[in-house]
Image (tube, rainbow, N blue to C red):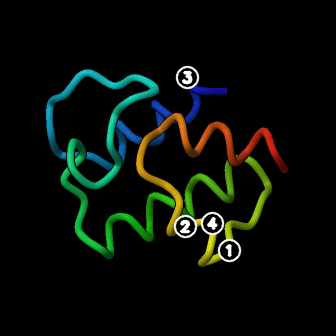
Amino acid sequence: MLEKIIEIAKMSCQENIEFDRETSVMADMELSSLEFFQFICQIEDAFGIRISERELNQIDTLGDIEDLILSK
């Protein structure tokens, strides 16, 4: 599952960074607000889930996204 999240992250990120569970979505990937929203939409579509605004506020790393998906 993390591999799929990383694949989506690489498509969304202009930075050449090493992706892992601890990669920060905003700080490391340097996404704008619009890019972050598009990234989350791609995650939702790929995994067939919906992420609430409250859940969005708890996301910092790619690992957080994986944990959230697993909890659904």
Judging by the rendered image, the residue that carries numbered circle 2 is 56
Judging by the rendered image, the residue that carries numbered circle 4 is 55
Q: Nearer the viewer, residue 32 or 45?
A: 32
Front of the two marks 3 and 2: 2
Q: Gap in Å between the C-alphas at discs 3 and 1?
A: 23 Å
**Position of residue 58 measured from the top left corner of the image (x, y, whole percent):** 53, 60
Dot 3 amino acid type: Glu
Label 4 element class: helix
Judging by the rendered image, the residue that carries numbered circle 1 is 52
Q: Nearer the viewer, residue 64 or 15?
A: 64
Label 1 element class: loop
Q: Residue furthest right?
A: 72
Q: Is residue 70 above or below residue 34?
A: above
Mark 3 vs 2, N-terminal side: 3
Quadrant of the rendered image containing residue 34: bottom left
Question: Relative to residue 67, is residue 62 drawn left or right?
Answer: left
Q: Gap in Å between the C-alphas at discs 4 and 3?
A: 21 Å
Q: Is residue 41 above or below residue 10?
A: below
Circle 2 residues within 10 Å: few <14, some 14–19, many ≥20: some
Front of the two marks 4 and 3: 4
Circle 2/circle 1 CB separation < 8 Å = yes
Q: Gap in Å between the C-alphas at discs 4 and 1?
A: 5 Å
Question: Relative to residue 31, is residue 9 drawn left or right?
Answer: right
Dot 2 amino acid type: Leu
Circle 4/circle 1 CB separation < 8 Å = yes
Judging by the rendered image, the residue that carries numbered circle 3 is 3
Circle 4/circle 2 CB separation < 8 Å = yes
Question: Relative to residue 55, is residue 6 drawn left or right?
Answer: left
Front of the two marks 3 and 1: 1
Mark 3 vs 1, N-terminal side: 3
